[in-house]
Image (cartoon, rainbow, N blue to C red):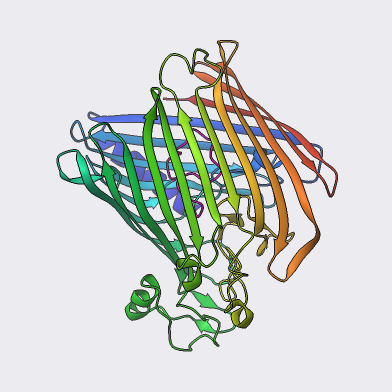
């Protein structure tokens, strides 16, 4: 709480000094829900930036930010937000607290700031299968190129990249673990705006303090080994077999084009966590998707559909077919023997939310999945904006612990905008139809207002 007060005072002082040139904004958001089961339907609590968990009934966020325009193409922003919620844990804490700079091509973020939503809330994973809108923002430093830098003009060959460092400051099995992320895209853009981007993302959790092994390797030499995927000396009881830290990665292909004046994007993510996955030994595991958006007045003659997304998530291989799996076992996505809290932050999955926590929310409990996901956004009856999500989920369990029968869940969300003025009000109707236990239904209300 002291840190919240201190940051707020610093924030307000900075704004008062710059009041002549700053665009100042404050937003209040509230959420409430009721549901029939012990936990809410999947899409009522999923991809909510860590503001809602499976048992949340009430949540509120107050956010304030000051944006300072430095030029037509660059700006500086200071932001802070406070979150109060109930659920598995009643909580009052920071939702965001950051300083950021955004230029023509480059950006820098220092602090705790949410990533932007790239697909209007229709995707289950946002940019890649490894990073969704599900968990809260992690404090750290980001440096990134947000628009491609081309070698000649504004087309031809270019590139994008990001380099980021974070501290995982939540309550987890390895205390104070660090997180490194880098990404690179080689981009080709034609004069007709056809674009293809090929690249990869690499994450690694490393360092920290273990109750069993004490302080884990955290020198600069260990950092270099972690970010390059090299193995360490046997300093942690042989737990890190392939490389130092908990390594995760994805190969990425994005193709953007126009078809009949529609903006179309094809998406492919191949997931890997070790050398065999890097060599495609776990193919066809990954994410496959198509996103269609129409910014014209109507979508094929009707406003009912303005954006559409279809995704497939498949993780049933996990390198089980390769010969070496007989020695070291198959993959175990988002889990790790040493970093047992896995690919989570504040007990919420960081990557695709179709991979689930176990019942005590300590480790990943389901990561062998097959999912078909659809998202649609448009305007019903010419004046009711809506968002619809539907996911056909098949869950098979986890490494060495398969379910006796596959678990089938039909998860859906219908969100209707009831007010679209200075007060914004959305009604949410969610449902999980399950093959293995009682189905769950829920209703939620989302309210927001710009205070200044």
Q: Residue at x 46, y 25 (%)?
A: 450
Residue that sits furthest to the top in the current view: 382
Q: Is residue 126 magenta?
A: yes
> In the image, is residue 273 above or below residue 386?
below
In terms of secondary structure, what is the magenta stretch mainly?
Answer: loop
Where, by quadrant of the figure, is residue 331 drawn?
A: bottom right
For image coordinates 32% across by 40% down, the residue present is: 195
Asked whether residue 269 is drawn in magenta, I would say no
Picture residue at 53% right of the left edge, 50% below the top: 287
Q: Residue at image x 48%, y 63%? A: 168
Residue 44: x percent and y percent?
66, 38
Image-based side of 423 in relation to 224, left or right: right
Viewer-side residue, 114 vs 95:
114
Residue 274 in view (yes/no): no
In the image, residue 399 sits, relative to residue 422, either above or below, namely below
Q: Position of residue 177 (x, y in %)?
A: 48, 69
Left or right side of 176 for 446: right
Q: Is residue 84 left or right of residue 230?
A: right
Q: Find residue 20 and report its horizontal and vertical position in percent.
A: 23, 28
In percent of width and height, residue 29 lies at 54, 32
**Magenta stretch, residue numbers:** 114-130
Q: Is any part of residue 330 visible from this angle? A: yes
């Amino acid at each position: 709480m002291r840190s919240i007060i201190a940051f707020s005072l610093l924030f307000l002082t900075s704004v008062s000094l710059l009041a002549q040139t700053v665009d100042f904004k404050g937003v209040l958001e509230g959420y409430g829900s009721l549901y029939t089961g012990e936990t809410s339907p999947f899409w009522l609590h999923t991809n909510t930036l860590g503001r809602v968990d499976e048992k949340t009934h009430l949540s509120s966020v107050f956010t304030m930010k000051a944006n300072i325009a430095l030029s037509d193409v660059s700006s500086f922003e200071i932001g802070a937000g406070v979150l109060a919620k109930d659920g598995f844990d009643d909580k009052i804490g920071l939702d965001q607290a950051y300083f950021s700079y955004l230029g023509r091509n480059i950006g820098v973020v220092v602090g705790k700031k949410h990533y932007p939503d790239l697909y209007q809330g229709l995707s289950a994973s946002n940019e890649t299968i490894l990073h969704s809108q599900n968990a809260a923002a992690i404090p750290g430093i980001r440096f990134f190129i947000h628009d491609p830098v081309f070698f000649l003009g504004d087309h031809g060959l270019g590139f994008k990249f990001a380099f980021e460092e974070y501290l995982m400051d939540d309550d987890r099995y390895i205390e104070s673990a660090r997180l490194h992320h880098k990404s690179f895209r080689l981009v080709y853009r034609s004069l007709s705006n056809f674009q293809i981007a090929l690249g990869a993302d690499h994450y690694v959790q490393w360092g920290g303090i273990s109750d069993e092994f004490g302080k884990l390797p955290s020198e600069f030499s260990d950092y270099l080994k972690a970010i390059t995927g090299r193995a360490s000396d046997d300093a942690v009881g042989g737990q890190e077999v392939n490389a130092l830290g908990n390594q995760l990665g994805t190969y990425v292909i994005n193709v953007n084009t126009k078809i009949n004046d529609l903006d179309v994007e094809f998406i492919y993510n191949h997931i890997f966590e070790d050398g065999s996955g890097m060599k495609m030994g776990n193919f066809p595991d990954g994410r496959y998707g198509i996103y269609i958006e129409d910014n014209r007045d109507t979508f094929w003659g009707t406003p009912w559909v303005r954006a559409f997304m279809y995704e497939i998530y498949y993780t049933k291989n996990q390198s089980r077919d390769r010969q070496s799996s007989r020695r070291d076992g198959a993959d175990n996505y988002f889990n790790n023997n040493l970093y047992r809290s896995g690919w989570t932050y504040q007990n919420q999955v960081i990557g695709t939310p179709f991979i689930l926590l176990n019942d005590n929310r300590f480790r990943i409990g389901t990561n062998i999945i097959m999912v078909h996901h659809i998202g649609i956004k448009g305007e019903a009856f010419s004046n009711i904006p809506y968002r619809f999500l539907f996911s056909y989920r098949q869950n098979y369990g986890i490494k060495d612990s398969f379910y006796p029968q596959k678990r089938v869940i039909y998860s859906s969300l219908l969100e209707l905008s009831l007010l679209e003025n200075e007060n914004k009000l959305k009604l949410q109707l969610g449902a999980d139809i399950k093959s293995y236990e009682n189905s769950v239904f829920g209703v939620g209300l989302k309210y927001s207002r710009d205070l200044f």
